[in-house]
Amino acid sequence: MTTKEAANYFGGTKELADALGIWPNVIYRWGKNPPVARQYEIEVKSGGKLKAEKADA
């Protein structure tokens, strides 16, 4: 998933940050994709609507 997809799903960057219990500025540092561990957390919190991508080998 991309950071933008995750933010859009939750209604914005602040809402995504609130859902994850982090400050919004952390999300701005992610770049295009959230870290893999956060992707799995977002997958769970979205009820599987957003899917984590495999880490680059």
Image: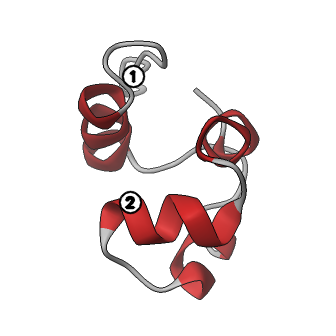
Label 2: which secondary element: helix
Q: Is residue 48 left or right of residue 44?
A: right
Q: Position of residue 37 (x, y in %)?
A: 25, 45
Along the polypeptide, which appears first: circle 2 or circle 1? Answer: 2
Q: Is residue 50 left or right of residue 57?
A: right
Q: Position of residue 3 (x, y in %)?
A: 65, 46
- The colouring scheme, among rainbow, by chain, secondary structure or one colour, is secondary structure
What amino acid type is highlighted by mark number 1?
Ala
Within 10 Å of disc 2 (Cα), the crowding (few <14, some 14-19, many 20+) is some
Q: Is residue 41 above or below residue 26?
A: above
Q: Position of residue 32 (x, y in %)?
A: 72, 47
Q: Which mark is residue 19?
A: 2
What amino acid type is highlighted by mark number 2?
Ala
The answer to which of 6 and 55 lies nearer the viewer is 6
Position of the C terminus by quadrant? top left
Q: Residue at x 43, y 15 (%)?
A: 51
Q: Which mark is residue 21?
A: none
For marks 2 and 1, give the one nearer the viewer.
2
Q: Residue at x 59, y 45 (%)?
A: 10
According to the picture, the residue beneath numbered tag 1 turns out to be 52
Label 1: which secondary element: loop
Q: Position of residue 45 (x, y in %)?
A: 30, 36
Q: Is residue 44 left or right of residue 25?
A: left
